[in-house]
Image (tube, rainbow, N blue to C red):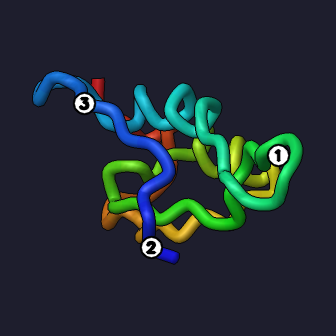
Amino acid sequence: NGVPLRFMLSPGQASDIAHAQPLLDKVRIPGRPGRPRKRSRWLLADKGYDAEHLRYYCDRYRIQPVIPLRAMPRNPGLACP
């Protein structure tokens, strides 16, 4: 329906990805009478949310992540000191 389910304001210098999982844990989706659904079907986010642990979280709860991949390669062994 395009309606935001939850939002959080954080300091500008804080990493967005640090707030993603706690924010998703607080989602309640209204619908039929009874207990509200706690998980959405999709997660729409920008490149700032492209992280393996968030994608793992989505897989675990059967959420389809719609997140563009970052341009940099995903090889932590080649990181500069």
Q: Residues within 10 Å of mark 3 (few under 14, many from 20)?
A: few
Label 2 or label 1, whichever comes before in sequence order: 2
- Specify the amino acid type for callout 3: Leu
Label 3 or label 1, whichever comes before in sequence order: 3
Q: Quarter of the image containing the C terminus?
A: top left
Measured from the top left, where is residue 6 in percent x and y?
45, 43
Vertical position of residue 68 compared to residue 28: above or below: below
Quadrant housing residue 71: bottom left
Q: Residue furthest right?
A: 34
Q: Nearer the viewer, mark 2 or mark 3?
A: 2
- Residue 53 appears in the picture as rendered: yes
* Residue 76 image label: none
Q: Residue furthest front?
A: 33
Residue under numbered circle 1: 60
Q: Secondary structure at mark 1?
A: helix
Q: Is 61 displayed left or right of 41 in the figure?
A: right
Measured from the top left, where is residue 7 in percent x and y?
37, 41
Vertical position of residue 71 compared to residue 34: above or below: below
Q: From mark 3 to mark 1, how far is it between C-alphas?
A: 26 Å
* Residue 2 image label: 2
Residue under numbered circle 3: 9
Label 2 or label 3, whichever comes before in sequence order: 2
Measured from the top left, where is residue 38 in percent x and y?
74, 43
Q: Residues within 10 Å of mark 2 (few under 14, many from 20)?
A: few
